């Protein structure tokens, strides 16, 4: 069972990417009573620090026909706490009906995150950045052809952010203390992966748009356009080659907390905040012996880092190695430990499920 990727700053909106039904799986890491399960997930990354995710889910009963045609609907709850006093908790709902022709995802959460942000006035310094707020998000999608799904989404965020220094005259983003963001948009998804938590074959493609307007109650008017493509290839029985490309573009008056990120390893996600970004990475995964595996990865990204003092484009390399231990073989769920480097920074990641 995976409550999203503990190292990701993205919301888990795709139904196949969030909670996995493990009611029929045996593992010492799962506490189960009937259709309700609880799973603790350790995590560590350079953005939020080291901590624990505790998640629980109640899966709704299905007929034999429903079991063959669609995943189980569920209600999930999760909380996270890390050593820098960051925390979040929330409740999510995912429903599937009409033989998986329709899908619904909903999220209600509260978060209080503490970040170390690079100081735009001092290349060697950092400032404290705290964000506290509530988010309500919903998406409904319909199968249109094969494994393609077309959906609409809506998001409401009410956030308060505090900086050590006054950034309003220094950077181009909206850094006001209190910000409300209300938007709606569309999604397009293609998912042919054999096992979403650790695919050996298949692709995952998603396009995401979100438009925030004052008429809907948003303080800022801005647009979001995002696209990602992930592909998985089993070269031999124990070796899988996976690659990913992604891009992000935002225009208008963009809040700093909703800027484009660079989806690579080796640095804190807050190191590169821009109005546009792109990245690509490739990873070789080798299951060496029984439950043990190793990976090697390399990637490259670019960001229009308008947050930085110099502005303009920055290039970001990423490379590293990792170790895997399969904690739930029936769902190919791994505990992963990655060591990554980028330019003059490095980072360690501990989580459940693959990086992409």
Image (cartoon, rainbow, N blue to C red):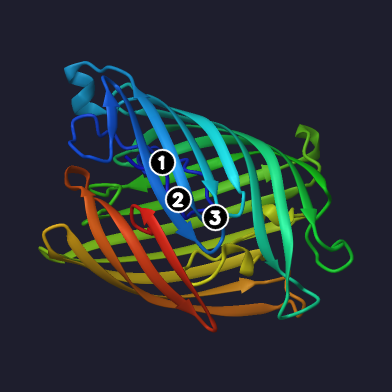
Residue sitting at x 79%, y 52%? 162
- In the image, 261 versus 325, the foreground residue is 325
Callouts 1 and 3 close, C-beta under 8 Å: no
Q: Spot the residue most to the right.
A: 169
Q: Is residue 69 left or right of residue 20?
A: left
* Residue behind mark 3: 226
Which label number is shown at residue 6? 2
Q: What's the distance in space between the residues labelled 2 and 1, CA to CA?
A: 7 Å
* Residue behind mark 1: 3
Whether residue 63 is visible: yes
Callouts 2 and 3 close, C-beta under 8 Å: no
| Quadrant position of residue 202 | bottom left
Whether residue 156 is visible: no
Q: What's the distance in space between the residues labelled 1 and 3, CA to CA?
A: 22 Å
Residue 92 position in % (x across, y down): 48, 30
Number of marks in the image?
3
Residue 213 position in % (x across, y down): 76, 41
Residue 133 position in % (x across, y down): 69, 39
Q: Quadrant of the C terminus?
A: bottom left
Label 1 sits on a secondary structure element that is loop
């Amino acid at each position: 069972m995976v409550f999203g990727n503990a190292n990701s700053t993205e919301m888990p909106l795709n139904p196949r990417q969030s909670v996995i039904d493990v009611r029929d799986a045996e593992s010492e890491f799962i506490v189960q009573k009937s259709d309700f399960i609880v799973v603790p997930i350790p995590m560590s990354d350079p953005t939020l620090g080291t901590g624990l995710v505790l998640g629980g889910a109640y899966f709704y009963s299905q007929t034999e026909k429903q079991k063959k045609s669609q995943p189980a609907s569920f209600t999930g709850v999760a909380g996270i706490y890390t050593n820098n006093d960051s925390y979040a908790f929330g409740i999510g709902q995912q429903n599937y009906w009409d033989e998986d022709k329709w899908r619904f995802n909903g999220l209600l959460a509260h978060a209080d995150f503490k970040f170390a942000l690079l100081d735009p006035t001092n290349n060697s310094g950092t400032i404290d950045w705290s964000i506290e707020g509530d988010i309500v998000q919903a998406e409904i999608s319909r199968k249109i052809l094969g494994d393609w799904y077309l959906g609409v989404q809506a998001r409401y965020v009410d956030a308060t952010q505090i900086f050590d220094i006054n950034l309003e005259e220094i950077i181009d983003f909206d850094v006001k203390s209190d910000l409300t963001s209300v938007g709606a948009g569309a999604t397009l998804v293609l998912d042919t992966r054999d096992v979403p938590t650790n695919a050996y074959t298949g692709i995952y493609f998603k396009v995401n748009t979100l438009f925030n307007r004052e008429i809907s109650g948003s303080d800022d008017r801005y647009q979001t356009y995002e696209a990602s493509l992930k592909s998985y290839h089993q070269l031999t029985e124990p070796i899988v080659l996976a690659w990913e490309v992604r891009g992000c573009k935002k225009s208008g008056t963009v809040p700093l907390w909703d800027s484009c990120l660079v989806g690579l390893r080796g640095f804190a996600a807050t190191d590169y905040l821009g109005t546009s970004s792109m990245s690509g990475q490739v990873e070789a995964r080798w299951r060496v012996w029984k439950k043990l595996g190793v990976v090697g990865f390399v990637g490259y990204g670019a960001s229009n880092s308008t947050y930085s003092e110099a502005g303009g484009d920055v290039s970001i390399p990423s490379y590293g190695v990792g170790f895997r231990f399969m904690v739930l073989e029936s769902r190919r769920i791994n505990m992963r430990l990655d060591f990554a480097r980028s330019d003059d920074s490095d980072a360690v990641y501990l989580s459940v499920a693959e990086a992409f």
